[in-house]
Image (spheres, helix red, strand yellow):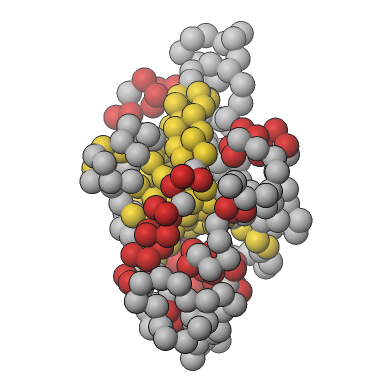
Amino acid sequence: MTMRMDAPASYPGAPTSSVPALNDIVDLHCYPLLERSGAAYRDLVAQGRALLEETGAVTFPGFVRPDAVAAMAEQALALRPRMFRFREMHTVYFRPAQDTEAPSHPLRRLLETEKDTVAYADIPESNLTRLLYRSDAVLAFVSDVLDQEQLYRHADPLAALNLQGFSAGQQLGWHFDRSDFSVTLAIQTPEGGGDFEYVRMLRRADDECYDAVGRFLDDPATQKIQILPQVAGTLTMFRGRDSLHRVAPVTGPRLRINAVLAYVDQPNAQFSDYAQKLFYGRTAAAPVA
């Protein structure tokens, strides 16, 4: 059983029909998204929930078929001229540095993030990653694994879906997320570096754990660092509000590419003008020429 999608096939090795099916993108044998009432689907969701509870993260290797993820990488590289270079010094809490704190305090220490991003408005309708994001079956699967009664695609025309590229020397500095969860797809791995590293539950809802965070920033050996595999085609769901995490610096000329699929628990979510300008260099949704 396949689900028809609403954009033309436009990638190498695409099926001969004018409209690709979800089966042409997702491995529906391993991930039976269209059979939500079936035992295999229920087991898959149960295993995902258990891993999220135990480790704060779950990966689904081979979620996207090899030929499709190769096409996604090719399409993302074609969009490289549209990438906005984001570079920011920030605290792990993404709050302004507090000059009143001691230099060693986590609220005063700055870390670097540098990445290149293609905004949602710049991703063509026929792009395979965009088709994946627009799939109701994928949305339902994410909602089920995250045990959310209802999730929505982000309504922001720039932030809903992003393609992120990390070239040599670029990285995502240690930080806590401001959202309860994130959903990402690995599209292309670099030659070296670029690991997704995290320290589970380094803070709590009622305690920022400044001392433990500060000790970790001084010496990462004070905590157990876990690494999530970033093999191309892997879908990852991660709870990063209380787990410190980063993308390690990339080495080599091969671009590290991943997609950030923004799902939220409230409809009509929007970024502020400030956030749009900060992350995308603009507030207008019109595609960059």
Residue 251 % position (x, y):
26, 37
Q: Residue reaching furthest front?
A: 289
**Residue that appears at 47% across and 76% down:** 9
Q: Where is 22 relative to 193, above or below?
A: below
> Which is more toward the observer, 202 or 3?
3
**Residue that appears at 65% across and 37% down:** 282
> Which is more toward the observer, 37 or 272?
272
**Residue that appears at 70% across and 33% down:** 274
Residue 31 % position (x, y):
42, 77
Q: Is residue 230 visible?
A: yes
Q: Where is 93 relative to 255, above or below?
A: above
All told, the count of numbered labels is: 0
Q: Is residue 49 visible?
A: no
Side (left or right) of 98 relative to 155:
left
> Which is more toward the observer, 282 or 189?
282
> Which is more toward the observer, 163 or 202?
163
Res 253 quadrant in image = top left
Q: Where is 72 relative to 209, above or below?
A: below
